[in-house]
Amino acid sequence: MSAVIVIWRSLSFSMLMANLRGDDHQLRIKRKKIIILCISLILAIVTAAWAWFTEPVTVDRAMQDRKVTNAVISYKTITKDGIAATTIQTQNVTEIKKVINLMNQYPYSRRLFATSPSNSSHYSDTHMIWISLGYKNGNGKPGIYNYLIYEYGYMQTSDSGEHLHPSGIGRFGTEKTKAFYSKITDLFHQLEGNSTWERTIDAS
């Protein structure tokens, strides 16, 4: 009789351990599923945030209900000896539209990472275009929207009250930004001889 009791207890203990092992296995599976779900959720949030942050924006969209009243374009040459700039500006509505129409063809996006020149003296005869669009908002408050484009594809943008932040044409690479620089430079050279644009030259 005692032998039967021992055997029964052994079987009961074995079944209990088997159940515990089964429960532990199920628990590990549940934990893995929860971890995978959390990682997937985090990745989805990060991807959505990145897509929103880098969404390409046209000038018209950036301006929203603000009316552009003035356009200033500076063509600058940067050397180790200093900066030479030729600047044109106008308040002519038709001329401003010419500039904005071209810029709208190249929507820009903010970049999280971009390689910028650490020191302009490292670049011999580097050229850049600086576009400033003066505007008034719905309340008549003035502001300026800035585009800074280097010939090698680095770009920055800012609205009034903001620091210049890394940007580019499209979400990746520099080729589209270089193409935009080429187009806007061609337009600058066309406009600088136009009497509706006031032209100034500065060297420093």
Image: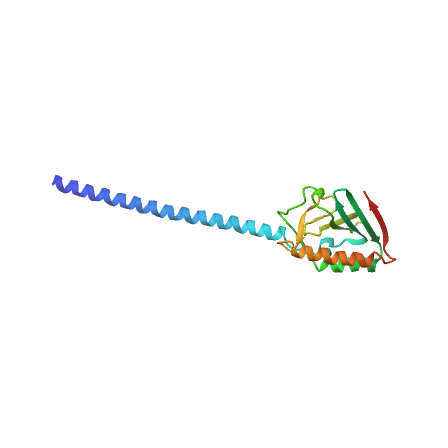
Seen in the picture, residue 99 relative to 82 is either above or below; the reply is below
- The image quarter containing residue 64 is bottom right
Percent across and percent down for residue 127 are: 74, 50
* Residue at the image position 35 percent from the left and 48 percent from the top: 26
Q: Residue furthest top?
A: 2
Seen in the picture, residue 186 relative to 10 is either above or below; the reply is below
Q: Is residue 196 left or right of residue 177?
A: right
User: Which of these two is toward me, 153 or 145?
Assistant: 153
Taking the image as drawn, is residue 140 in sight? no
Percent across and percent down for residue 89 are: 83, 52
* Residue at the image position 48 percent from the left and 48 percent from the top: 39
Seen in the picture, residue 186 relative to 140 is either above or below; the reply is below
Taking the image as drawn, is residue 62 in sight? yes
Percent across and percent down for residue 121 are: 72, 42
Seen in the picture, residue 71 relative to 10 is either above or below; the reply is below
Colour scheme: rainbow
Q: Residue furthest right?
A: 195
* Residue at the image position 79 percent from the left and 56 percent from the top: 188
